[in-house]
Amino acid sequence: MAEESSPRKHSESSASKLLRNAPVDLLGGILVNSIVSTNKSTPEPNTNNLQLASKKNSARDKPALSVPITTLNFKNFVSKCGPVFAVQEAVEAVIAWENPSKTIAFACMWAWLALNPVYFILLPNIVLISILLSTHTQRYPNGTGDDLGTDPISGHHILDDPIEGSPDESQHPHLLLVDVSARLEPRQLNQKKFSARVSPDEHTKFNGRLLSTIGSTLIVPLIPWRFLLLLGGETVFILNHPYVQVWLAQLKSASTSSV
């Protein structure tokens, strides 16, 4: 009897252990499943979001804009692009009839150039000379007196400063060659790509351009260029006259009201 009771006690003890450990095992399984499900449900980090966050952080890390640096950059921009804006304003003033005598003079000059188109080659030099003269008169309003070559703000003579070369260009001339080669490299690559592959479309484009060049060469001498230049230039002056602008506005309003 004692031998039979021992296995029963052993089986009962093992069963009781299983019953005791069952809630713990069940709870552990639930925790493992929940952890695995959360790992699967969490999306992978998006590279675009990371890049945007890094850009925002880098923008925050940048120092604030400095007023002296911004002013210096604006002065450099104006010194380089100022003549372009000045020419644009002068052309607009002439076309808009702000000074009628000047506009009439330019209209007569355009008529003379249209009838003699050979002198169009002198226009770039005339524009440059006018820009230089206007700049000189603005910097030195007293003419060619004692103030010539003197800074109007500081009063210091320009020739008193020693003339020195740029250290970057004198000490590192190979940088200029590197810059030139870097600018020419993309064009060389495009030329190699174009010469490497020639498709039928490119053949048709080449043939079309060749035929158009030959045809235009034959037709261009027959076009009345003087009459077209004269008509086009004088039409611009006439259409921008204040009286013509008022008449065009009335005509436009009448046409819109009739519709």
Image (cartoon, grey):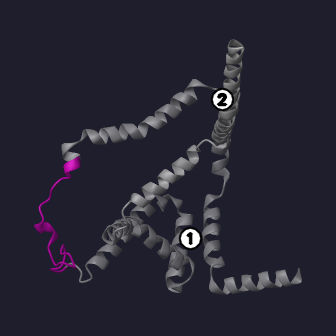
How dense is the environment of label 2, judged by Cα within 10 Å: few (below 14), some, or many (20 and up)? few
Residue 254 position (above or below residue 208): below
The residue positioned 18% from the left and 44% from the top of the image is 171
Give me the disc on residue 230.
Answer: none
- Of 116 and 5, nearer the camera is 5
Q: Mark 1 highlights which residue?
A: 111
- In this picture, residue 100 sits left or right of residue 242: left
Q: Which contiguous range is marked in magenta?
A: 145-168
Percent across and percent down for residue 70 are 36, 68
Per the picture, the main secondary structure of the magenta-coloured stretch is loop
Specify the amino acid type for callout 1: Ala
Q: Mark 2 highlights which residue?
A: 17
- In this picture, residue 124 sits left or right of residue 95: left
Percent across and percent down for residue 137 are 30, 78
Q: Quadrant of the N terminus?
A: top right
- In this picture, residue 227 sits left or right of residue 121: right
Q: Quadrant of residue 244?
A: bottom right
Which residue extends farthest front? 1
Give the secondary structure at mark 1.
Answer: helix
Q: Does the magenta segment cover residue 167?
A: yes
Q: Quadrant of residue 138?
A: bottom left
Percent across and percent down for residue 216 are 66, 45
- In this picture, residue 65 sits left or right of residue 1: left
Q: Is residue 203 visible?
A: no
